[in-house]
Amino acid sequence: MTNWTIDDNATIAGSGDSETLTLNCITATSVSETWYLGAMEAVIEYDTYASGSGPVSTFQYKTGVTRVACEADTWHVYDGESFTSLGWIKIKGVKS
């Protein structure tokens, strides 16, 4: 639960593969820590455990070759398919 920064309109429950991030209202936002994923084509899996349980959230990401470059990157809207990770990534979920 320490891997995400959440506002008062979001909650995190569980851990590991059963961790659930819930964005409770239209203003809910959650931002992940910056972590090293590696250079690859990355996929954000969402609505995995509670399929169709509510409005879809919008996801954005940052990526960079270094942690500093990732933090300096602008937010990119995730297209629902995949994105190219340059090594370091950061994810943001926004209730839509």
Image (spheres, rainbow, N blue to C red):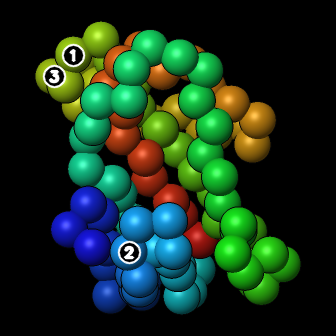
Residue 21 visible in this rendered orientation of the protein: no
**Residue 15: quadrant of the picture:** bottom left
Q: Is mark 1 on a helix, strand or loop?
A: loop
Disc nearest the viewer among 3 and 2 = 2
In the rendered image, the vertical position of residue 70 relative to residue 18, given as above or below:
above
Q: Identify residue type, mark 2.
A: Ser
Q: Which mark is residue 68?
A: 3
Q: Name the residue under label 1.
A: 66
Q: Is mark 2 on a helix, strand or loop?
A: loop
**Most foreground residue, 68 or 26:** 68
Q: Which of marks 3 and 2 is nearer the N terminus?
A: 2
**Most foreground residue, 29 or 85:** 85
Q: Residue at x 72, y 80 (%)?
A: 50
Q: Identify residue type, mark 3.
A: Val
Q: How many labels does the image show?
A: 3
In the rendered image, the vertical position of residue 59 relative to residue 14, given as above or below:
above
Q: Is mark 3 on a helix, strand or loop?
A: helix
Residue furthest to the left: 68
Disc nearest the viewer among 1 and 3 = 1
Q: Mark 2 points at which residue?
A: 15
Q: Distance between the residues labelled 1 and 2?
A: 27 Å
Q: Earlier in the sequence, mark 1 or mark 2?
A: 2
